[in-house]
Amino acid sequence: MIATILLQASGAGGGLGMFLPMVLIIVVFYFFMIRPQVKKQKDQKKYVEELKKGDRIVTTAGIHGRIADMNDATFLVETEGGGKIRFEKSAISLEASKALNAPATPAKTK
């Protein structure tokens, strides 16, 4: 019975009419989900590659510090108390680090 209904539906609208909604869903999914995520990953990679010794950063765990030393895959981060912790480059948070280094804007007065 279900096969008969499906055959009747596909015969009336053709093959393209049945796949068009699925294609539209995939296109919308790509432009609203996949593409922005790929752009964000590229921005994160570029930011980490441009970091240098002495830059202030925030890790994804929320640890604030300055880059004391760097090598291919890791940063040595010096914290306020003088302690040093080694982190993978992937542990640097782009948004939090940019917010930390952004110049403070003066408050508007009335």
Image (spheres, rainbow, N blue to C red):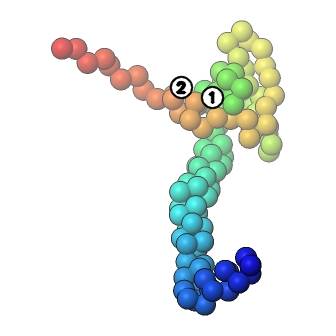
- For the residues labelled 1 and 2, say whether their Cβ atoms are less than 8 Å apart: yes
Toward the viewer: 82 or 48? 48
Tag shown at residue 38 = none
Reading the image, the residue beneath label 2 is 100
Q: Earlier in the sequence, mark 1 or mark 2?
A: 1
Q: In the image, what residue occupies the spot 26% across and 18% down? A: 108
Establish if 12 lies above or below 99. below
Which quarter of the figure is the N terminus placed in?
A: bottom right
Q: Position of residue 84 (x, y in %)?
A: 78, 19
Residue 73 location, quadrant: top right
Which residue is outermost to the front?
Answer: 1
Q: In the image, what residue occupies the spot 67% across and 23% down? A: 62
Residue 67 location, quadrant: top right
Tag shown at residue 57 = 1
Q: Position of residue 105 (x, y in %)?
A: 36, 23
Q: Secondary structure at mark 1?
A: strand
Amino acid at the residue labelled 2: Leu
In this view of the protein, can residue 67 be seen by the observer?
no
Establish if 10 lies above or below 49. below
Establish if 84 lies above or below 13. above
Which residue is outermost to the left?
Answer: 110
In this view of the protein, can residue 87 be seen by the observer?
yes
> Viewed as shown, does residue 16 lie left or right of 62?
left
Q: Position of residue 76 (x, y in %)?
A: 77, 28
